[in-house]
């Protein structure tokens, strides 16, 4: 829009009125700039900032849909049919032979048997009843000294009223299937016919934590020896205290830690001074002093999108230039990952992208634009941390692996609103660690939990989760 008053009209005004008018203009220009900054902050989303996807309301208006490919939803013509295969008749619980008694046309009686009858199998579950074993401990009196002696429980028999499989199922319902203690008690009572209360569920939870403590400690002690770790954290609550749920993703296992601080002390406590590997992470400063960082390009892509969405044309231009190179990076990385190009070819294609990205960041440093200087200066000063995946083979350019591991924990936090005590926090970090590690190692988590509890009742440590790693 053209200005309401031209420069010539302003020059024709009396000096004192012209100064007053300029002061009013300056005031409202500052006001407009502040309001534009507020509007830009309101427009922040997981798409153009480091906000987690879970921070966006599930009913938020989505981005404009991409152009449809013309295919209808669902299975496409020619795709392999997926159906449950029939099991052999010998494995069925019961086989019911159904023979027609009369012809459906003339009503004449029918005899004989079909050598290849149509088979129809119905799957169901049996009526569930708890297995209750009673141990009768006799107390006998010595005829010589009159001292009574009571028989001891056999080795491996729990001192409480819950067996290993019941405790394993209870902790799995809470830690893996994200059910509350009241819901778990309701399930045990109404489905398994097992008398239960929320208070008893807490006792079973504590027994599960104790049984898995040795396996958790072993995994945590292995972290400093790992060559590559993906690390991320998410806020939660412990009672009324703000806490953070940390995740450490190694090659074949994952460790969760729930702490009441987000400071670098958590990293130093768990990784110690012995850790000298690569850390896939975002740009949070607590990671700067640990190992060799690889900053996540997925986070950077969202930051560059925020530049593109900015109203300032200089900021927008740099955002478009950086986004263009980022898309080329991911395109080349996908080709290298699927074997379309070799590692050496990937490195050769990335060299001009690396040089141009560094040059663009330097342009932002000297742009004189407050929106660009701070961000570009940080990235340029630590530019080596952008390209660790080029210098060290086997490193990914994103931190997606730890974000995927953290997603079930975030869902748990949204459903439970955190923990109520330090004991609850220890249970959460332990069961999440065991379940996620079992998933990554293709282990049956229920079978592992049962074995760990059986070992605990026998006075032995839990089976190692590092075996075969």
Image: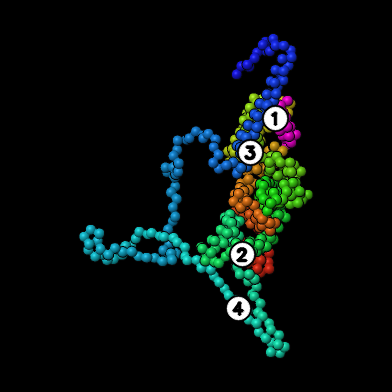
Q: Is residue 244 magenta?
A: no
Asked whether the residues under the numbered discs 4 and 3 touch, taking CB atoms below 8 Å apart as contact, a structural biologist would say: no
- Residue at image position (50%, 66%) is 128
For the residue labelled by badge 1, is the local secondary structure a helix, a strand or a loop? helix
Asked whether the residues under the numbered discs 1 and 2 touch, taking CB atoms below 8 Å apart as contact, a structural biologist would say: no
Front residue of this view, candidates 249 and 263 = 263
Q: Which residue is mark 4?
A: 136
Dot 4 or dot 3: first in sequence order is 4
In percent of width and height, residue 407 lies at 61, 47
- Residue at image position (65%, 54%) is 419
The quadrant of the image that shows the C terminus is bottom right
Q: Disc 3 to disc 1, how far (Cα)?
A: 20 Å
Front residue of this view, candidates 141 and 39 = 39
Residue 242 drawn above or below residue 129: above
Q: Disc 1 to disc 2, how far (Cα)?
A: 56 Å
Instruction: For label 1, count other residues whose C-alpha is less than 10 Å away and answer few (under 14), some (14-19) or many (20+).
Output: some
For the residue labelled by badge 3, is the local secondary structure a helix, a strand or a loop? helix
- Residue at image position (71%, 54%) is 220
- Residue at image position (41%, 66%) is 94
Instruction: For label 3, count other residues whose C-alpha is less than 10 Å away and answer few (under 14), some (14-19) or many (20+).
Output: some
The answer to whether 201 appears left or right of 123 in the picture is right
Q: Which residue is mark 3?
A: 298
Mark linked to residue 200: 2
The quadrant of the image that shows the N terminus is top right
In percent of width and height, residue 437 lies at 63, 54
- Span shown in magenta: 368-384
Instruction: For label 2, count other residues whose C-alpha is less than 10 Å away and answer few (under 14), some (14-19) or many (20+).
Output: some
The answer to whether 194 appears left or right of 17 in the picture is left
In percent of width and height, residue 158 lies at 63, 70
Q: Which residue is mark 1?
A: 371
């Amino acid at each position: 829009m053209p200005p309401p008053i031209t420069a010539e009209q302003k020059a024709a005004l009396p000096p004192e009125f012209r100064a007053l008018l300029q002061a009013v203009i300056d005031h409202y220009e500052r006001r407009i700039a502040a309001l534009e900054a507020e509007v830009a902050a309101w427009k922040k989303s997981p798409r153009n900032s480091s906000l987690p996807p879970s921070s966006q309301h599930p009913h938020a208006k989505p981005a404009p849909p991409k152009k449809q490919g013309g295919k209808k939803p669902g299975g496409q013509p020619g795709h392999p049919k997926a159906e449950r295969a029939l099991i052999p008749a010998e494995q069925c619980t019961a086989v019911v032979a159904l023979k027609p008694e009369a012809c459906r046309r003339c009503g004449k009686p029918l005899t004989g048997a079909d050598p290849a009858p149509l088979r129809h199998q119905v799957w169901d579950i049996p009526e569930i009843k708890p297995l209750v074993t009673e141990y009768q401990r006799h107390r006998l009196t010595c005829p010589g000294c009159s001292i009574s002696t009571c028989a001891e429980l056999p080795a491996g028999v729990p001192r409480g009223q819950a067996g290993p499989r019941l405790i394993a199922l209870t902790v799995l319902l809470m830690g893996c299937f994200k059910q509350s203690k009241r819901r778990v008690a309701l399930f045990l009572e109404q489905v398994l016919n097992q008398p239960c209360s929320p208070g008893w569920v807490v006792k079973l939870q504590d027994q599960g934590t104790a049984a898995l403590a040795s396996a958790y400690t072993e995994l945590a002690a292995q972290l400093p020896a790992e060559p590559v770790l993906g690390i991320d954290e998410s806020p939660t609550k412990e009672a009324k205290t703000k806490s953070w749920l940390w995740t450490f993703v190694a090659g074949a296992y994952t460790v969760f830690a729930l702490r009441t601080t987000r400071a670098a002390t958590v990293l130093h406590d768990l990784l110690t001074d012995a850790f000298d590997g690569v850390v896939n992470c975002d740009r949070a400063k607590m990671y700067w002093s640990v190992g060799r960082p690889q900053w996540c390009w997925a986070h950077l892509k969202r930051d560059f999108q925020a530049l593109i969405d900015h109203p300032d044309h200089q900021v927008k231009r740099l955002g478009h230039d950086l986004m263009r190179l980022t898309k080329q990076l991911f395109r080349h990385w996908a080709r290298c990952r699927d074997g379309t190009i070799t590692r050496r070819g990937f490195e050769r294609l990335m060299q001009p992208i690396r040089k141009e990205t560094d040059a663009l960041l330097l342009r932002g440093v000297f742009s004189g634009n407050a929106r660009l200087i701070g961000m570009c200066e940080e990235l340029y000063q630590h530019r080596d941390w952008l390209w660790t995946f080029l210098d060290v083979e086997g490193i990914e350019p994103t931190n997606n692996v730890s974000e995927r591991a953290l997603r079930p924990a975030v869902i748990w936090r949204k459903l439970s609103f955190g923990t109520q005590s330090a004991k609850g926090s220890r249970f959460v970090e332990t069961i999440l660690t065991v379940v996620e590690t079992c998933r990554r190692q293709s282990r049956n988590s229920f079978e592992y939990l049962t074995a760990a509890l059986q070992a605990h009742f026998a006075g032995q440590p839990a089976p190692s989760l590092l075996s075969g790693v």
